[in-house]
Image: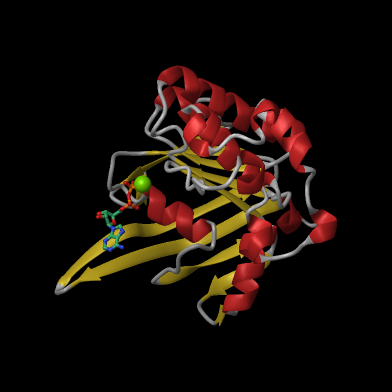
Amino acid sequence: MSRENNLALEAQHLTKIYKRGAEEIVAVDDVSLTVRKGEFVSFIGPSGSGKTTLINILGCLDNTTSGSLKISGETVFSENKCLSESDLTKIRRQVFGYIFQKFYLVPTLTVYENVLLPFAFFKKAEANADPMEILRFLGIDKRTSHRPSELSGGEMQRVAIARALINKPEILLADEPTGNLDSKRSVEIGEILKRLNEKEGLTVLLVTHNPALAGIAHRTISLHDGKIA
Ligand SMILES: Nc1ncnc2c1ncn2[C@@H]1O[C@H](COP(=O)(O)OP(=O)(O)O)[C@@H](O)[C@H]1O
Ligand SMILES: [Mg+2]
């Protein structure tokens, strides 16, 4: 296997500038980083330091002003190339699972239906994970027919994690996944991410304010004013 294939992602000189009228905000400032397959990396830094912008770029959810990005050796964008929107959509569906601070569960659907929600938008029958196996792994298999309003915050986040896992992603992106949870539930979510990394070999990118949570990663990257500190 070539060295490149051991890299989950490789980012070079990423810069993202937002323009608000005449004002320019450099949200990500010349960031280069590589993440190996199976690595668990956390991102920490004050509010406004560019964590969300960076992780969204790495997760192909946002574009950049300049720089290049490769996922598993494939160029997503560079100075002279950018994947088409349909190829980007494919990467988002096949490579990534996304978890956010807000759970984004559909209140009228059951736990089971929320987990299967991605299939309402696309089919990928062969590669799908078994929903019940995931729900058991996450300890919410007794909750399949409940609605989100009947769950605790920690349970809701576990449903959101189950939904992110249903496509068997290679890379899990979690942006402040415990931001709405108390410290006990935060530890539980951290343990789940760690188990997914160790037992399932998932590459995990975790953004968090919580230094204790960041500490469970193999490596912590600190951001300040859009730069790696
Ligand atoms: N859509 C946007 N338009 C303009 N500025 C933005 C936008 N999103 C983020 N920013 C700015 O970019 C900087 C980095 O934001 P963000 O990536 O959300 O940081 P963090 O996640 O670390 O709190 C901040 O100054 C923020 O105000
Ligand atoms: Mg953020």
Nearest to the observer: residue 88 or residue 154:
154
> Residue 86, percent across and down?
62, 76
Residue at (65, 61) in percent of width and height: 120
Occupied quadrant, residue 136: top right
In the picture, measured across the screen, residue 137 lies left or right of residue 32, that is right
> Residue 42, percent across and down?
50, 37
Image quadrant where one finds the C terminus: top left
Occupied quadrant, residue 89: bottom right
> Residue 104, percent across and down?
47, 48
Residue at (59, 70) in percent of width and height: 76
Q: Is residue 44 above or below residue 33?
A: above
Decide if residue 83 is in sight here. Answer: no
Nearest to the observer: residue 87 or residue 72:
87
Q: Is residue 214 above or below residue 206?
A: above
Nearest to the observer: residue 227 or residue 205:
205
> Residue 102, percent across and down?
42, 43
Nearest to the observer: residue 2 or residue 105:
105
Occupied quadrant, residue 126: bottom right
In the picture, measured across the screen, residue 174 lies left or right of residue 19, that is right
In the picture, measured across the screen, residue 73 lies left or right of residue 101, that is right
Q: Is residue 20 above or below residue 168?
A: below
